[in-house]
């Protein structure tokens, strides 16, 4: 390995060590993590609700088909976001 590769490897090892040691401290860390999880879940849900409502308003007859479908899609995407975030915290 050349010197540049060794420097990159050393930097990467330091970053991995720091990441593994990081734990959100006390109530502030819990609030930050909880707030992030909440936003990761609720934003796709709200986007789905508003987009679905708008699509349903374009129809002449009363329908909630798009609203319900996109809310469900928002819940699925939000759940996936939360899963990926929490999985990243654990590793």
Image (cartoon, helix red, strand yellow):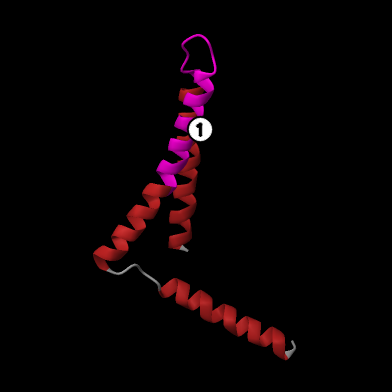
Q: Residue furthest left?
A: 27
| Nearer to the camera, 63 or 14 | 63
Above or below 20: residue 74:
above
Q: For the N terminus, give its image quadrant.
A: bottom right
**Which residue is labeled 1 in the image?**
73
For this rendering, which residue is in front, 85 or 70?
A: 70
Could one spot residue 69 in this view of the protein?
no
The residue positioned farthest toward the bottom in the image shown:
3
Residue at 71% x, 90% y is 3
Q: Whole-percent x and y of residue 31?
A: 29, 58
Callout 1 crowding tier (Cα within 10 Å): few <14, some 14–19, many ≥20:
some
**Residue lying at the far top of the rendered structure:** 61
Mark 1 falls on what kind of element? Answer: helix
The residue lying at 58 percent from left, 78 percent from top is 12
* Residue at 54% over, 18% down: 58
Q: Is residue 45 left or right of residue 27?
A: right
Instruction: Return the residue nearer the eye: 58 or 76.
Output: 58
Q: Looking at this view, is 10 or 32 the one in front?
A: 32
Rendered view: 5 above or below 22? below
* Magenta stretch secondary structure, dominant: helix
Magenta region: which residues? 40-65
Which x, y percent locates residue 23?
36, 69
Q: Residue at x 59, y 84 (%)?
A: 10
Q: Position of residue 78 (x, y in %)?
A: 46, 42
Q: Position of residue 4 (x, y in %)?
A: 71, 87
Residue 45 sits inside the magenta stretch:
yes
Instruction: Report whether residue 38 is seen.
Output: yes
């Amino acid at each position: 390995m050349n010197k540049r590769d060794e420097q990159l490897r050393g930097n990467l090892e330091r970053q991995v060590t720091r990441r593994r040691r990081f734990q959100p401290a006390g109530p502030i860390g819990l609030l930050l993590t909880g707030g992030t999880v909440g936003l990761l879940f609720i934003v796709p849900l709200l986007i789905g609700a508003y987009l679905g409502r708008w699509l349903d308003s374009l129809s002449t007859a009363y329908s909630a088909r798009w609203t319900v479908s996109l809310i469900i899609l928002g819940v699925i995407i939000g759940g996936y976001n939360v899963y990926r975030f929490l999985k990243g915290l654990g590793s």
